[in-house]
C-alpha cells in the first residue's frame, strides 16, 4: 500500500512530460501546478469547487484541480492549458472574443476542449450541462458559445 | 490546499483500508475529495490527520448487475453512475448535483457520507429500498467484518456508521429501475446551486413512495407520508374520472378530492420545514405542494 507523509517527491505526467515535485500530501494539484511546476495557467479563484478557473484535464476528463490532491494524480495524465498548443478551441476563443479579462479562460478552454472531443456534434443541452461548470464574470457567455460552435466547425473541417 | 500535515494512504483492498484507519488517528476516507479538500482548507475544526484514498479498491468501483441486483460501488463518480443509466431516476437525480466537472470526482458514497445536509443521491436509493455493503474495522483480535443491510436501517437523517466503517457499495433491486418515477429540483438561482427542494417519487403498483432533500436539514422519507400520498393518489378517481391531483383542478386540497387527509395532511406529516437564507419554510411548503401535485400527475 502506498503511504506518504512529510515532504515527498512525486512524479506527475503533465502535458506529456514527467515532472518531479516535492510536495506535502495535503497540497492540491492546483497549488503544485502553479507553485512547484511554474504552470500558472490554471487559476486560483474560489478554491471551493464553484468557479472552474482551476479546471485541468485528468486522463482527458475535466476536474477542478483545487479539490484534487497532487498525490492522487501520480498515475494519471494531467493536461493544463500550457499543454494545448494552438488547439482549435484556443483559436476559436481568440477569433470569437470568447474572453475579456482572461481569468476564467484556461479553465473554460480545457472544459470546452474535452466537451468537443466527447461530443463532436453540437447539442445545446449537453453544451449547457458541461459549460455550466465554469463561471465567467466578463463575457456574458455569448462569445464563449460562439467559440464552441466555431471550434466544432474547425475540428470537423477536412 | 490542506494546511494540516496529513499522511496519504492508498490501499488496494477494503481490509487494508479499515486496517489503515485503525492505525492512523484522525484518518478519514478520501473518495472524490470535494468535501475533504474544501472543508479541511476552510475549517480549523475539521480534524484531518490522514487521508485513506479508497478509489483503488475494486469492490468500491463495481458497476454491475449480479445476483438479482444492480450493484454500484461507493467510489464511483456521479458522472460514471449517471452515464451507466441503469437506474434512470438515480441518473436524473445525480445530474442535478453540483456541476458536471465536480461530478467527475464527487462519489456516490461520498455524497451520502458527507457533512452537507442535501445528500441528494440518497433519495432514489431510499425509494428503491436499496441495501448497503460496508466493512467495519476489527477490534483487538476480532477481524474486520462486512455487513449488508437495508439502507433505511442505517440511514437516520444521515448514514449512521460505526467509527471507521467504510461504505463499499449499494445494491438496488432490479425491479426498481422499472417503476414509473418523477423528479423535480428547484433552486434559488441557476441550475447549479444547492436545492431548495429536490423531490423524487416512484409508483410501485398502486403505492406511492416519496423522498425529498433540501426541505429539512437532511434527506427525508417516511412510511407515514408514503401512506398518505398513496391514499390521496388512489382517491384521485373518486371525484373526477381518473384525473390525478393537479394544480389545474379547482381545489385539489379540498376534502372531497383528498382521500382522508389530502395535501395539507401530507405537508403536516413532513414536519417542520427548513428556513434559511435561501428560502423561508412557507416558501418551501408552497414549492412542495406544487411539486407533489406535479409528481403525482407524472405517475398517474
Ligand atoms: C462545489 C460543490 C457542490 C455541491 N453540490 C451539491 C449538491 O448540489 N447536492 C448535494 O447533495 N451535495 C452537493 N455537494 C456536497 C457533496 O455531495 C458532499 O460534499 C460529498 O461529501 C462529496 O463527496 P466526495 O466523494 O467528494 O467526498 P469526500 O470529500 O472524499 O468525503 C466526504 C466525507 O465522506 C466520507 N466518505 C467518503 N466516502 C466514504 C465511504 N465510501 N465510506 C465512508 N465514508 C466515506 C469521507 O471520509 C469524508 O468525511 C457539493 C459539494 C461541492 C464541493
Ligand atoms: S478555484 Fe477551483 S473551482 Fe474555483
Ligand atoms: S473573461 Fe473575465 S472572467 Fe471570464
Image: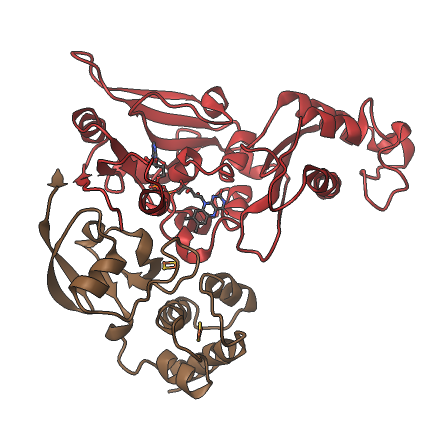
Q: Which chain is red?
A: B
B293 sits to left or right of B110: right
For the view shown, which residue lies furthest in the front direction? B44
Specify the color scheme: by chain
For the view shown, which residue lies furthest in the top direction? B141
Q: Is residue B153 positioned above or below A28 on the image?
A: above
Q: Is residue B65 positioned above or below B38 on the image?
A: above
Viewer-side residue, A139 vs B212:
A139
B166 sits to left or right of B190: left
Looking at the rendered image, the quarter that the C terminus of chain B falls into is top right
Q: Is residue B40 positioned above or below A135 on the image?
A: above
Q: Position of residue A35 (x, y in %)?
A: 20, 63
**Residue under the point 57% across and 46% down:** B195
**Residue under the point 40% across and 85% down:** A94
* Residue B109 in view: yes
Viewer-side residue, A156 vs A76:
A76
Figure quadrant of residue B168 = top left
In the rendered picture of this protein, how many numbered marks are placed on residues?
0
Say which colour chain A has. Answer: brown
Figure quadrant of residue A99 = bottom left
**Residue under the point 50% across and 35% down:** B122
B67 sits to left or right of B88: left
**Residue under the point 79% across and 29% down:** B264
Q: Position of residue B80 (x, y in %)?
A: 39, 49
Figure quadrant of residue A153 = bottom left
* Residue A60 in view: no
* Figure quarter occupied by ligand 3: bottom left
Q: Position of residue B32 (x, y in %)?
A: 33, 45
B300 sits to left or right of B74: right
Viewer-side residue, B178 vs B140:
B140
Viewer-side residue, B35 vs B249:
B35
Amino acid at each position: 500500500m502506498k503511504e506518504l507523509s512529510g515532504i515527498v517527491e512525486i512524479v506527475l505526467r503533465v502535458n506529456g512530460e514527467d515532472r518531479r515535485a516535492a510536495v506535502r500530501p495535503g497540497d492540491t494539484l492546483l497549488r503544485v501546478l502553479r507553485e512547484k511546476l511554474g504552470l500558472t495557467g490554471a487559476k486560483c479563484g474560489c478554491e471551493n469547487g464553484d468557479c472552474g478557473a482551476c479546471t485541468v484535464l485528468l486522463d482527458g476528463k475535466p476536474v477542478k484541480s483545487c479539490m484534487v490532491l497532487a498525490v492522487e494524480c501520480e498515475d494519471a495524465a494531467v493536461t493544463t492549458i500550457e499543454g494545448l498548443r494552438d488547439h482549435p478551441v484556443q483559436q476559436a476563443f481568440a477569433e470569437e472574443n470568447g474572453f475579456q479579462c482572461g481569468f476564467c479562460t484556461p479553465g473554460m478552454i480545457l472544459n470546452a476542449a474535452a466537451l468537443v472531443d466527447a461530443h463532436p456534434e453540437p447539442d445545446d443541452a449537453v453544451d449547457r450541462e458541461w459549460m455550466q461548470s465554469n463561471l465567467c464574470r466578463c463575457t456574458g457567455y455569448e462569445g464563449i458559445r460562439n467559440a464552441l460552435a466555431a471550434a466544432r466547425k474547425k475540428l470537423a473541417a477536412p | 490546499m490542506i494546511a494540516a500535515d496529513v499522511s496519504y494512504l492508498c490501499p488496494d483492498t477494503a481490509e487494508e483500508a479499515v486496517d489503515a484507519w485503525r492505525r492512523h488517528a484522525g484518518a478519514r476516507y478520501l473518495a472524490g475529495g470535494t468535501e475533504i479538500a474544501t472543508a479541511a482548507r476552510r475549517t480549523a475544526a475539521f480534524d484531518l490527520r490522514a487521508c485513506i484514498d479508497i478509489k483503488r479498491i475494486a469492490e468500491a468501483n463495481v458497476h454491475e448487475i449480479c445476483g438479482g441486483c444492480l450493484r454500484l460501488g461507493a467510489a464511483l463518480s456521479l458522472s460514471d453512475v449517471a452515464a451507466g443509466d441503469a437506474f434512470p431516476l438515480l441518473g436524473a437525480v445525480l445530474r442535478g448535483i453540483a456541476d458536471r466537472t465536480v461530478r467527475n470526482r464527487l462519489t456516490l458514497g461520498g455524497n451520502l457520507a458527507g457533512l452537507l445536509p442535501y445528500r441528494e443521491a440518497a433519495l432514489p436509493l431510499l425509494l428503491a429500498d436499496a441495501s448497503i455493503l460496508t466493512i467495519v474495522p476489527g477490534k483487538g483480535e476480532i477481524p474486520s467484518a462486512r455487513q449488508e443491510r437495508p439502507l433505511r436501517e442505517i440511514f437516520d437523517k444521515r448514514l449512521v456508521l460505526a467509527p471507521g466503517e467504510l461504505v463499499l457499495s449499494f445494491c438496488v433491486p432490479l425491479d426498481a429501475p422499472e417503476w414509473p418515477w418523477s423528479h423535480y429540483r428547484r433552486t434559488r438561482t441557476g441550475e447549479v446551486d444547492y436545492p431548495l427542494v429536490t423531490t423524487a417519487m416512484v409508483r410501485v403498483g398502486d403505492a406511492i413512495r416519496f423522498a425529498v432533500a433540501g426541505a429539512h436539514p437532511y434527506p427525508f422519507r417516511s412510511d407515514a407520508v408514503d401512506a398518505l400520498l398513496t391514499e390521496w393518489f388512489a382517491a384521485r378517481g373518486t371525484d373526477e374520472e381518473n384525473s390525478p391531483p393537479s394544480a389545474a383542478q379547482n381545489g385539489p386540497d379540498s376534502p372531497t378530492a383528498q382521500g382522508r387527509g389530502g395535501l395539507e395532511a401530507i405537508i403536516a406529516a413532513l414536519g417542520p420545514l427548513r428556513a434559511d437564507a435561501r428560502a423561508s419554510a412557507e416558501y418551501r411548503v408552497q414549492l412542495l405542494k406544487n411539486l407533489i401535485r406535479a409528481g403525482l400527475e407524472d405517475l398517474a
